[in-house]
Image (cartoon, rainbow, N blue to C red):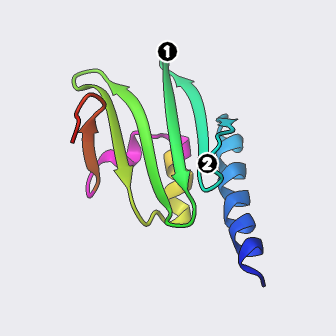
Amino acid sequence: MKRSEIDLSIDGWIVEAGILQGWKRIYVRDVTLLSFTKIIQGERVKISVWPTKMTVAASLRYPKQGKLQKFCRNVRQDLMEKIFEDPFVHMESGYQRKTMYDSG
């Protein structure tokens, strides 16, 4: 199997998992990035996935903390599917948290 075929199969299940949970795909210039958006509880949530590293970023607003962007590396398929079901689920432990206004 060629490298491009492997990448397409990874991209394919990620896109399918997002669409099945009602996420809208956002097409961006960066071909290594898959982006999705969805309105949840009146707020726009964005999920970005870098399939080659299985890194996920979620931009969302928490009631107490305000707007946050969180990252998770080496995401397995089962967790990726859970993130699309509920993007707050992967924020529990082992993830970097950074407010969207921090410079560092």
* 84 over 51 or under it: above or below: above
Which quadrant holds the C terminus? top left
* 104 over 42 or under it: above or below: below
The residue that appears at 59% across and 42% down in the rendered structure is 35
Q: Nearer the viewer, residue 82 or 43?
A: 43
Residue marked by disc 1: 42
The secondary element bearing badge 2 is classed as loop
The residue that appears at 71% across and 78% down in the rendered structure is 3
Start-end of magenta stretch:
84-94
The residue that appears at 73% across and 58% down in the rendered structure is 12
- Label 1 sits on what residue type? Gly
Residue 27: x and y in percent read 69, 38
Q: Are marks 2 and 1 in contact (CB under 8 Å)?
A: no
Q: Earlier in the sequence, mark 2 or mark 1?
A: 2
Q: Where, by quadrant of the figure, is residue 11 drawn?
A: bottom right
The secondary element bearing badge 1 is classed as loop
Q: Nearer the viewer, residue 87 or 70?
A: 70
Q: Which mark is residue 30?
A: 2
- Label 2 sits on what residue type? Asp
Local crowd at mark 2 within 10 Å, few (<14), some, or many (≥20)?
few
Task: Tell me, yes or no, whether the highlighted magenta stretch contains residue 51.
Answer: no
Residue 32: x and y in percent read 61, 56
